Amino acid sequence: MSDKSGEGAGEQPERISEAEHTVMEALWQRSPLTAQEVCEEVCGPRGWSLATVKTLLSRLVVKQAVGTEPDGKRFLYTPRIARSDYVGTESRRLVDRLFGGRAAPLFAHLAQSEALTEDDITEIEALLRELKS
Amino acid sequence: MSDKSGEGAGEQPERISEAEHTVMEALWQRSPLTAQEVCEEVCGPRGWSLATVKTLLSRLVVKQAVGTEPDGKRFLYTPRIARSDYVGTESRRLVDRLFGGRAAPLFAHLAQSEALTEDDITEIEALLRELKS
DNA sequence: CTCCATCGTTTACATACGTAATCGACTACG
DNA sequence: CGTAGTCGATTACGTATGTAAACGATGGAG
């Protein structure tokens, strides 16, 4: 089988960098967007120029993390990977790397470092109850 | 105040890369170690050469993440940052970046993606009970 | 039809990272 | 005393990342 560069199904997605992730967040929030619109969302907070956003968008297109759709002269950009997938992968990576794949130690750490608010605790209790249903 | 490059207390620690982290884990496991010994721990699993470990160690020394102590001809390397600090920082970064700083959504994600084992759940329940004590 | 504002694309460049070979100093063996 | 092994330090080099300017096409204003 020519797995040359076709689209098969077995492409493990390329890593998305932190700057790129910022752009993804904008697209997950609302899409499709033009480069201009993405910039309006993120350039301010990050102190970026439009050029930077354009670069990041191209790289994300190459990585197949966002897709384009022509709209007259310009493009509309849309995420091609779900936020939940990204978040899941990243979370898993962290848990694997730092806690030997076990979630409990991560939880313990968050608890100890006071990263858990009252609300978090209440919510987690609710989730636990659901899990045991 | 001269915050020039002295040692004050206000140095936010430089990022430790993934490869460097592998070396840190070896040192957290047991220390002090020689470069040789670190290599014995990690070169196999990662397919690294001793040279690579040496490079990573130097970079970690520059980043002040590990300290050295002369031992005759060679050095003994020791972590200068606690694993729990590193783990805490990294966890926080992830939670901030992906979950708006809230731990509950992270937890929900782990739960949904089946990243939680029975044991995890039991342990977390125990932790929760402790927190509410 | 001409000119300008915009697009996306290409090129740029500094720093970080992964991975390692090489080099100068020193020590231990013969 | 000379030589080989070992150590940390220096240098190397390709790719990734952050950040952006330059370029060529093109569509709309006049």
Image: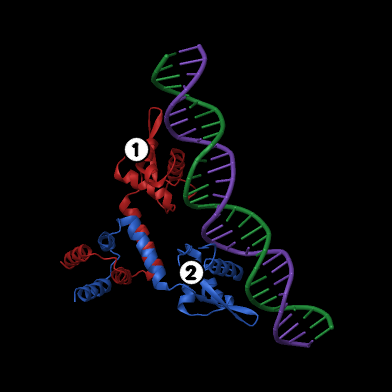
Chain colours: A blue, B red, C green, D purple
Q: Could you say where residue A20 lies in the image, as x and y percent from the top left?
A: 50, 66
Q: Chain of mark 1?
A: B
Describe residue D6's horizontal placement relative to residue A50 as left or right. left
Query: Disc 1 on helix, strand or loop?
Result: loop
Label at residue B33: 1
Decide: few, some or many residues near mark 2? Use Cα within 10 Å; few <14, some 14-19, many ≥20: some
Decide: few, some or many residues near mark 1? Use Cα within 10 Å; few <14, some 14-19, many ≥20: some
> What amino acid is at disc 1?
Leu
Quarter of the picture containing the C terminus of chain A is: bottom left
Describe residue B65's horizontal placement relative to residue B114 as left or right. right
Q: Chain of mark 2?
A: A
Q: Could you say where residue B84 lies in the image, as x and y percent from the top left?
A: 30, 53
- Residue occupied by mark 2: A22
Q: Is residue B38 above or below residue C7?
A: above
Query: Disc 2 on helix, strand or loop?
Result: helix
Describe residue A48's horizontal placement relative to residue A83 as left or right. right
> What amino acid is at disc 2?
Thr
